Image (spheres, helix red, strand yellow):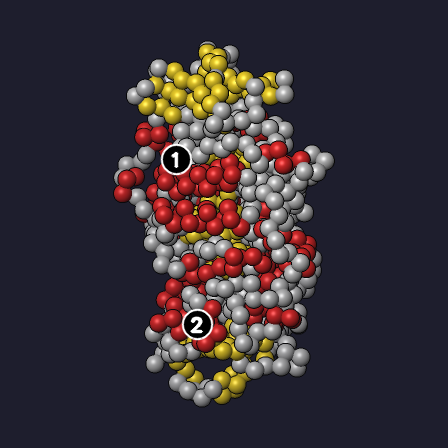
Amino acid sequence: MKKSLYVSAMALSIFAAANSLPAAAQSAFDQKFVNYPTYSGDDLELSVNDNGTQFRLWSPAAQQAVVLIYENGHSGDAIENIKMTFDAPTGTWIASSPEKLYGKYYTFRVLQDGKWLDETPGVWAKAVGVNGKRAAIIDMAQTNPAGWNADKGPEVKNFSDVIVYEMHHRDMSMHPSSGIANKGKFLALTEPFTVSPQGLSTGIDHLKELGVTHVHILPSYDYNSVDEANPQFNQYNWGYDPLNYNAPEGSYSTNANDPKARIIEMKEMVKALHDAGIGVIMDVVYNHTAENDGSNFELTAPGYYHRHWDNGNYSDASGCGNETASERQQMRDYIVNSVKYWADEYHIDGFRFDLMAIHDVDTMNEVASELKKINPSIFVYGEGWTAGDSPLAPERRALKENVSKMTDIAVFSDDIRDAVKGHYTNAADRGFATGKPGQEETVKIGIVAATAHPQVDYSKGNNSKFPYASSPEMIVNYVSCHDDLMLTDKLRKSMPEESDSVRQAAAKLAQTIIFTSQGTPFMFAGEEIFRDKQGVHNSYKSPDSINAIDWNLKAKNLDLFNYYKGLIALRKAHPAFRMTSAKDIAKNLVFDKIDSKKTPNLISYSLKNNANGDEWKEIKVVFNGADHAQSVNIAKGDWKIVAIDGKISPEADLGATNGGKMTLAPYSALILAKTK
Ligand code: CA
């Protein structure tokens, strides 16, 4: 959730020096964990079968362990206290009951270094009571909606075909204008035919109308900050404070006291989206835990799952108090098995890794390869940076600069993000699309998806100095997301003298750059109707009055919505925007020579040779990010107009031209096509 260029920039200087892999443990303090026995069976913590109920807790250094059984998910004394026995070769503690304990709850307690630690539901609770303090024993077979066995997400041939829409459950549905009954709940996205007061579609129908291929939902596993027992208080949180990684968040269910309800309802949401042809990507935050000593990791196997400095203090590359240790076998297995579980049990179609560079390259490669075995359409991407220094050596981190060491993993391009709309740390800063000169080369880095290209000079890049992606499928392009000022707010802060209509012209230009660039485009929910967050850049716990999308804006800004819709339809219809290899891009994407010193904020390029099997022979794409009109010379030919002056037509029916001098309005894109 937080971001830092510092670690990315620092990594560059360390790259050259790094020539040998460091030891498995990164600090002297962590050395003792290297030889812990590990266990990755799928019966960790709980299994129920014809022999009854079995518990198996991984805790290699414990002196004793017990499992406590409860009638209730959050109150009352234990009805049973079962002593566990140690299986030294696997480092696990085992106990069992001859009965199937469906309907009951459990916690573990561990004695280590002579001290009984607090109760914990463990790290593998797949169902939990209210607020996630106790694990629930339920029959998962009873949580599947009708038709679940046949449920399947969209097939993805290439990851550059994916169009990501990032959303928070409450943002989409809480506003009275959403017309949605189950406000703030998983079920909100199962409601068809919901409309705004002006009769325009909202919710899932809006997503279908817009044409995105995948929704990326902000954390939907059980997180810590919202009190699930008091939904009437309408608390809001993004959810980057993980509690139970393998159970859904209770505040998004209609009844957090019923452990099955949140599971059933999340699956119903997934199924409704799948039925609409839309994939579901989960935002996962394995990089840190909400609490340090009080986290479920610490209460089951103290020290093991987190990294520390030599002095034993928690290291904090997350900026949230701690960071996890993916390089240790049991933690690596945990991450891999957890995403596999979500893919298998919930049919999840993709994972967005928060602060992915806290994890090591090998873990991320294992994540992608294991998920591919379940479903080759699963898309994995993440933030290729950390939010602070880490004991993990930079060459091992899943940094964006290391993305070419990873297969089937993509990273966010902060290059295109900051170059197009201005730097994220400075609200007033403008970018290429809002009139700031000198950003042209960095925008080009984005256009070619950070791949090697004969006409792109990486030495002039703002954030990156070398072509770090060996394939366009490694790059996610965006101008805004839940973090920092979202697009509308950024435009208002950086263009204070302008009107919203001028800002919307800039918004159209910025997104035209994103949606025509190579790589995978990504957008933030509501920017297509010019929603804002009242200038709040870090709205992680702001009220719904800041975060909820006001659907009245759809009628007000229908022209902008239709432009986004047109952009998405254009991209989907034309594989030239979705090339799959760096070689193809270097060959088929040709920039026109423009002296950016003389005419800044002007980029023009062609996609040639029916690129990537496109039916159009050549596509000309021109961006004018200046506050005044600028002209370009278009080669003579039989061109049809696809986009001009803030209008777009995927069918290329905005007129025709034979080339020559063409003038672009301020803050606008021109797209032409030689259709044969
Ligand atoms: Ca929770």
Q: Earlier in the sequence, mark 1 or mark 2?
A: 1
**Helix, strand or loop under label 1:** helix
On screen, residue 108 above or below 493: above
Q: Residues within 10 Å of mark 2 (few under 14, many from 20)?
A: some
What amino acid type should be assigned to the residue bearing mark 1?
A: Glu
- Residue 584 - label: 2
Q: Amino acid at mark 2?
A: Asp
Q: Is residue 493 visible?
A: no
**For the point 47% across and 50% down, which residue is it?**
365
Q: Residue at x 40, y 74 (%)?
A: 611
Camera-side residue of 621 and 47: 47
* Front residue of this view, candidates 664 and 20: 20
Give the label on residue 265, or none.
Answer: 1
In-image side of 43 versus 392 (left or right): left
In the image, 470 versus 172, the foreground residue is 470
* 142, 237: nearer the viewer: 142
Q: Mark 1: give few (<14), some (14-19) or many (20+) Cα within 10 Å.
A: many
Label at residue 642: none
Residue 291 spot, x, y in % from top left: 61, 32
Q: Split into 4 quadrants, where in the image is the C terminus?
A: bottom left
